Image (tube, rainbow, N blue to C red):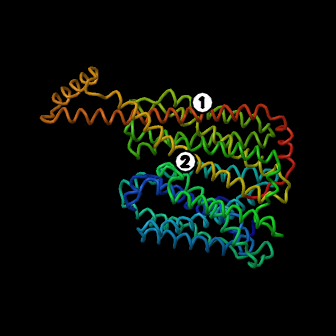
Amino acid sequence: MKSIFKQWVPEWLIKLILFSCLMPSMVLFFLPGANVEVTAGYYGSQPSDVQFLIILFYAGFVGFYILERRFFLFFPVKQYYIIFNLLQILNCYLMYRITDITWVYGLRFIQGMLFASAVNLSISMIFSRLNSERAKEVSYSIFFGMLLCSSPFNSFVTAEFIDSFNFDELYLYAALAFLPGLLLVFISMTSIRHVKPYPLFSLDWPSCIFFSGLIIAFGYMMVYGQEVYWFWDAHMQLALGIGIAFLVCFVLRQMTLKRVYIKISIFSNRRFLLGLLILYMMYIERFSLSVSNQYFLQVLKVDPIHLSYMQWFNMLGIIIGVLCAMYWILAHRSVKWIWILGYCFLLTFHQIMFFSFESKGNDYYFWIPLCLHGIGVGLIMVPTILFTIASVKPHFAVSAAAICLAARYFGYTCSIGLQNFFKLFESNQHQQIFQDYLQRNNVILQTYFDKEATKLLENGLQFREQATAVKLVTERVKNQSFVRYAMDYYELMSFISICILIIIFLSPTLKNMYKKLKQNIVSPA
């Protein structure tokens, strides 16, 4: 693979080319969620629609992942880099020009498909630069470390842009971000083929469509289910019916095809299922951080720019966790204790935040839990994926990698569904309880109103001080309801961490599974 670059290209420039081709695609991943209110306002939509935009990108990545390998094997590396970079530039330009969110939904799904191309090609190129004995572990650590950092890094990069420029201009700058990597590819790469091209016939588009339709239907239900009271709504019933139909069609197709899209038989492997459970639960806990971010914004009144600075502590934790996990994997440490340590960090994060949620506070107290969360996620991610893929036979590794990707998708979408449930149901329950005490005959409340009204008069308000005091109390009730919702959610996350730790402790075969990890050949992502 090294000869794909021209002789004059130094090693540092090769790495720069690889990262310059991958990073813009990663930034696009969570770009709509960098500032949900701004995105929703620009498209004239709801915050739930912004969540769905991120899910569609993820669904494109998951659904196209296996089919993309056929294109990866067909095109020479240089031409393939050029093709998907040009398509990404075109897609970003269309996102810049189009304001109708209905069309944006389709463009986001296509962005996810192109991201699958960038991932497969870039991680394979990173793998080719490393010593063969440790190439898989290091390349996976580099890629997944970047992927874990993409959300906080994206918030940091785009926060000031969103504050200083129109939202649509972000996609114009995103299109320009692909140009340096494209130019470097033109200059430094040759058009050499390393494998015989596999013709693009008999592409299994039906399986890709069935699988993509299934995961999109599930993501749709997780985003919009709670706000329309789930299956009381006709759209939810339709989404459920479509999801079940696609699932049945996909499974039946895999049972009848000679060359299947995904090997269904790998689900009979108990070690593989345990790895999926660990990965799925970790992704639910990973995105519990968004509740803390909402708390910083809504209750502590931290502006998005300063919130993006706080995310550096989470990124620092991720880097520490990934590096430690990579070191222990290369040193052949037991994956069982890496998992235990990672979930202990996540449990500690949720417990610290549970007791730190208050209606008032200072943002600089929270750098330690943010760092702990990053360390926990970084410790669990790479060992779990390597372990899960290595738990199956080598010729099932591609299917195992695809299922791991789907497990991460389902973990992310379920975290959105859980948060929407707690936010829309539990928060309203708490607010209703608080309002039951806010009666005019409540002497304590009336005394508080008088105190607030007097304070407003002393600070210069000359009229309607009582009405303003009522608004202040209403705002505080809303914040207190959010605090209670956040505490309930983190209590659930703590319970999940404890259950997973018990499962890991009681699993008798983890030592043997780690031996399998050392012996098996792990396929590229």
**Above or below, 374 relative to 448:** below
Q: Position of residue 406 (x, y in %)?
A: 67, 55
User: Relative to the observer, which residue lies in front, 490 or 172?
Assistant: 490
**Residue at point 34% right, 33% down?**
476
Q: Which mark is residue 417?
A: 2
Q: Is residue 392 left or right of residue 166?
A: right
Does the rendering let one see residue 113? yes
Looking at the picture, does residue 477 appear above or below residue 270? above
Image quadrant for the N terminus? bottom right
Residue 401 position within the rendered picture, expressed as x and y whole percent measured from the top left? 74, 56
When asked about the image quadrant of residue 300, the answer is top left
Q: Is residue 482 above or below residue 51?
A: above
The residue sitting at 52% across, 55% down in the picture is: 30
Q: Nearer the viewer, residue 4 or 42?
A: 42
Q: Position of residue 280 (x, y in %)?
A: 67, 46
Looking at the rendered structure, the secondary structure element under dot 1 is: helix
Residue 348 circle label: 1
Question: Between 454 and 340, which is closer to the camera in this rendering?
Answer: 454
Left or right: 37 in relation to 13: left
Three-letter code, disc 2: Gly
Amino acid at circle 1: Thr
Residue 59 higher or lower than 96, as above or below = above
Nearer the observer: mark 2 or 1; the answer is 2
Residue 253: mark = none
The C terminus sits in image quarter: bottom right
Q: Residue at x 73, y 31 (%)?
A: 502
Q: Residues within 10 Å of mark 2 (few under 14, many from 20)?
A: many
Tell me how far mark 2 sits from mark 1, CA to CA. Answer: 23 Å
